[in-house]
Amino acid sequence: MESLYTHCCGLDVHAKTVVACLLTPDQKQVRTFGTMSQDLLELADWLTAAGCTHVAIESTGVYWRPVYNLLEGRVHVILVNAHHVKAVPGRKTDVKDCQWLADLLQHGLLQASFIPPPPIRELRELTRHRESLVRDQAAVGNRIQKVLESGNIKLGQVVTDVLGVSGRQMIRALVAGERDPQVLAAMAKSRLRSKMDTLRLALEGRLTEAQRFVLGELLDTYEQLEAAVLRASEKIETLLYHQEPTLGKAVTLLESAPGVGHRVAQIVVSEIGIDMGQFPTDKQICNWAGICPGNNESAGKRRSGKTSNGNRYLRSALVQAAWTSRRVRDCSLSRLYQRLIRRMGKKKALIAVAHRLLIVLYHMLREGRLYEEREAPVMAERQRVKAGNRLVRRLESLGFRVTDETVEPVAVAPSTG
């Protein structure tokens, strides 16, 4: 097999060591380096001195990141999915792994994973940190409600947001030892005061000393996480609109799409970047995100259409946007959801809408234009033509001969019954 790269290297990265196999026309060298910064600089100098042009790294946890960041700009680095480069069973050693990577790289048999440029990676680090904080905050909020239910405080049955202004004030009073339902209900604000009678009944529970202590600790943790989320959001805004204004413009562009809010737009930009040259077609980006139907067919039978594993952060954001877009009036996404929900159910319909939305966002970023809604009559005509073609194919499969004679659709008067 023809060699594509004459000077290349495969790296098997671990927490404490990096095993490198350097291939040149004259020889094959295998060396082991540490993972401290000084060791990685020694690795980079060794590769540069040998004239290495391409390096392949197997994606292993987060251990590949410092190696990638240090080598980036000095050689062409390829990050490889470990699932795609499994060696022959029974030959699993660190040396053989790096040699296998180097051999595959030399002959151009490796497919590089998508790694965005440094500014996008910085934004991704912040948005993922904020998402983890939001998940932790939601978990603590659920624990607060469990403690309240354990003490037979039915606040969640009356108040829409237990951790709103009124709810927090009541919980603080409960932690301080207040037990009078009348006093607690009087802390209600705004429209909640119209439920005073029900609120007094809901607050007649009994919290033990231990439950009050746990409730206070959980509420403090919840507010600390809330402040952390706010600080992360402020840092993201600074990055987008002061340090990297190009990214901020892309976020504003995506916000014009139905269902895409400010936070969802930030996540989309942080996960896929703004240069769509990494994804030649919208099908490829949907496959990478794990938001398109899977293929599992054998002997002419389709076994499953389950979506593949992809970018869970992007997938979650798209599903949120799809859930929001279903309520937008005169929107092609909401019409798609209403059309699919009858035969697919809510969950599958949402995934289908998220799939369509990602295609829309891909073309918006690629062409640099705002979202434009297709007119309803145009969409209706397209659906009519598709339905007609489908029925024609069905009739022909049953042995009928169909002649093409198009007539204007007859308007049906609405029923008065």
Image (tube, grey):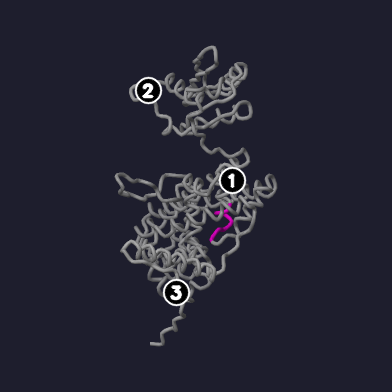
Vertical relation: 88 (above or below) 417: above
Local packing at callout 3 (Cα closer than 10 Å; few below 14, some 14-19, many 20+) is: few
Q: Nearer the viewer, mark 1 or mark 3?
A: 1
Q: Quadrant of residue 144?
A: bottom left
User: Viewer-proximal residue, 148 or 51?
Assistant: 51
Where are the magenta residues, as a range? 259-265
Q: Which mark is residue 92?
A: 2
Label 2 sits on a secondary structure element that is: loop
Residue 68 quadrant: top right
Q: Position of residue 164 (x, y in %)?
A: 50, 62
User: What residue sits right under mark 3 in the picture?
Assistant: 195
| Amino acid marked by disc 3 | Lys
Query: Which is more toward the observer, 30 or 207?
Result: 30
Drawn side of residue 142 relative to residue 233, left or right: left
Is 261 one of the magenta-colored residues? yes
Residues at marks 1 and 3, CA–CA distance in whole angstroms: 53 Å
Mark 1: secondary structure: helix
Q: Nearer the viewer, residue 9 or 242?
A: 9
The reply to whether the C-beta atoms of the residues labelled 1 and 3 are less than 8 Å apart is: no
User: Distance of mark 1 from mark 2, alpha carbons?
Assistant: 37 Å
Secondary structure state at the residue bearing disc 3: helix
The residue that label 1 is drawn on is: 276
Contact, CB < 8 Å: mark 1 with mark 2? no
